[in-house]
Image (cartoon, rainbow, N blue to C red):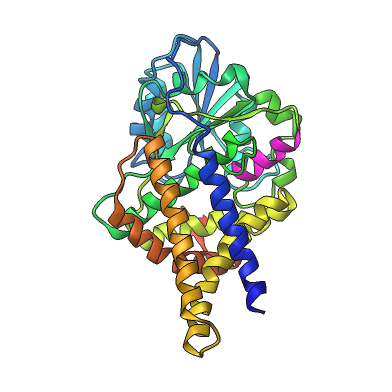
């Protein structure tokens, strides 16, 4: 029985080795950034974002780019002053276009409905996406465009700037590890995940896979699961942008409740990943089980059914592999290394993953921006 428990742990360790190997395959700023004239439609969906929308619009307006840019801002039924602020901004720059989902009848749920509206109204083939709570440098679009000649789907890097709160430090390390895994797996031609905070793909690619119709009932699905749909089409080439100026800074959560609710929404789609990528689902499952077994191992140790030396060895291997990934990934992306934050992340991670995993089956009791999640 004990050896059956060890199988997912062994699988998780193999995955970590796979990702660590992948960190040797990518380089940051692989070549000089050249001017680009590929026209781009930048799409942002907003719901009740009155506190951050102006910062985002200014970030977009300041983009340095030789080619054509249009900025499609989709108001997803906001109940605050979001609409007023967007419309006021569009009057000063005709590249900005305002749309609302209030009368849009497409049979889609949640953010995908707003994205579909934006994509339908996009003039250009290349679509670039970010979120209202994100910030980026003035060469973000230019840096992302450097990959447009050799891919159909582009995953961008996002990071969290930690504040003086424990949750933000945990979130920063946790999100960094997710990004390292995404970049490493993509560099090994096995892309696993992405985020709507920073990604791009062709409108023609979107249309070829039938858009979001196959995943219209899902809560999330507009990034990682949609990536899996595109991946099934063998002719689609997927890449990861490693240009430093293409990186996006995402929202920092300073409360555990806000952070946990965000991750529960993400985990809702992870539960059905087996429908789209069975191997990736095994990775997700082994990660969950490995962290779930930690308290079980302590219980077995307490009742004398396991030798403490075995427990120490397993903890040591897990710690070393995750530490190597953290250090190598941070060095590759020229990010600072905080061993204290990593140690706190390592200690909290099992509890966090168990909570997220089980809570994701109760999405119907959660609300997001004033409306029920499901």
Residue at the spot x=64%, y=59% of the render?
271
Q: What segment is highlighted magenta in the picture?
A: 222-233
Question: Vertical placement of 353 versus 33: above or below?
Answer: below
Using residue 354 as the reference point, say whether residue 348 is left or right of it.
left
Can residue 372 be seen? Answer: no
Residue 55 lies in what quarter of the image? Answer: top left
Quarter placement of the N terminus: bottom right
Using residue 293 as the reference point, say whether residue 136 is left or right of it.
left
Q: Residue 77: x, y in percent?
A: 52, 43
Q: Residue 308: x, y in percent?
A: 46, 79
Residue 329 lies in what quarter of the image? Answer: top left
Q: Nearer the viewer, residue 70 or 179?
A: 179
Q: Nearer the viewer, residue 2 or 351?
A: 2
Using residue 236 as the reference point, say whether residue 200 is left or right of it.
left
Q: Is residue 361 magenta?
A: no
Q: Nearer the viewer, residue 111 or 323?
A: 323
Question: Vertical placement of 177 versus 244: above or below?
Answer: below
Q: Residue 221: x, y in percent?
A: 63, 46
Main secondary structure of the magenta stretch = helix
Question: Vertical placement of 283 versus 158: above or below?
Answer: below
Residue at the spot x=37%, y=62% of the render?
256
Residue at the spot x=37%, y=44% of the render?
160
Q: Residue 135: x, y in percent?
A: 37, 34
Can residue 304 be seen? Answer: yes
């Amino acid at each position: 029985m004990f050896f059956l428990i060890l199988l997912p742990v062994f699988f998780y360790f193999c995955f970590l080795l796979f990702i660590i190997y992948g960190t040797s395959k990518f380089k940051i700023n692989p070549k000089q950034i050249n001017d680009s004239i590929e026209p781009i439609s930048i799409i942002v969906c907003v719901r009740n974002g009155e506190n951050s929308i102006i910062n985002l619009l200014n970030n977009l307006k300041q983009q340095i780019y030789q080619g054509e840019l249009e900025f499609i801002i989709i108001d997803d039924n906001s109940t605050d002053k979001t609409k007023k602020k967007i419309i006021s901004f569009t009057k000063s720059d005709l590249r900005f276009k305002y749309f609302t989902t209030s009368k849009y009848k497409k049979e889609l749920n949640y953010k995908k409905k707003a994205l579909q509206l934006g994509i339908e109204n996009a003039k250009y083939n290349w679509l670039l996406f970010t979120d209202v709570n994100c910030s980026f440098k003035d060469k973000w679009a230019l840096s992302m465009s450097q990959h447009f000649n050799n891919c159909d789907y582009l995953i961008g890097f996002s990071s969290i700037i930690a504040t003086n709160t424990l949750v933000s430090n945990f979130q920063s390390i946790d999100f960094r590890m997710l990004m390292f895994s995404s970049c490493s797996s993509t560099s090994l031609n096995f892309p696993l995940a992405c985020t709507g905070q920073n990604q791009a793909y062709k409108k023609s690619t979107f249309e070829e896979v039938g858009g979001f119709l196959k995943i219209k009932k899902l809560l999330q699905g507009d990034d990682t699961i949609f990536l899996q749909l595109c991946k099934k089409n063998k002719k689609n080439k997927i890449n990861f942008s490693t240009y430093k100026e293409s990186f996006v800074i995402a929202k920092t959560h300073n409360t555990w409740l806000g952070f946990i609710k965000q991750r529960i929404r993400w985990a809702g789609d992870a539960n059905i990943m087996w429908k789209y990528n069975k191997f990736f689902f095994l990775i997700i499952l082994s990660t969950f089980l490995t962290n779930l077994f930690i308290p079980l191992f302590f219980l077995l140790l307490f009742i004398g059914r396991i030798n403490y030396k075995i427990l120490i060895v397993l903890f040591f291997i897990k710690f070393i592999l995750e530490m190597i990934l953290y250090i190598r990934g941070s060095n590759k992306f020229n990010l600072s290394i905080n061993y204290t934050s990593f140690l706190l992340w390592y200690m909290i991670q099992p509890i966090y993953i168990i909570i997220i995993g089980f809570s994701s089956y109760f999405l119907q009791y959660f609300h997001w921006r004033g409306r029920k999640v499901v």
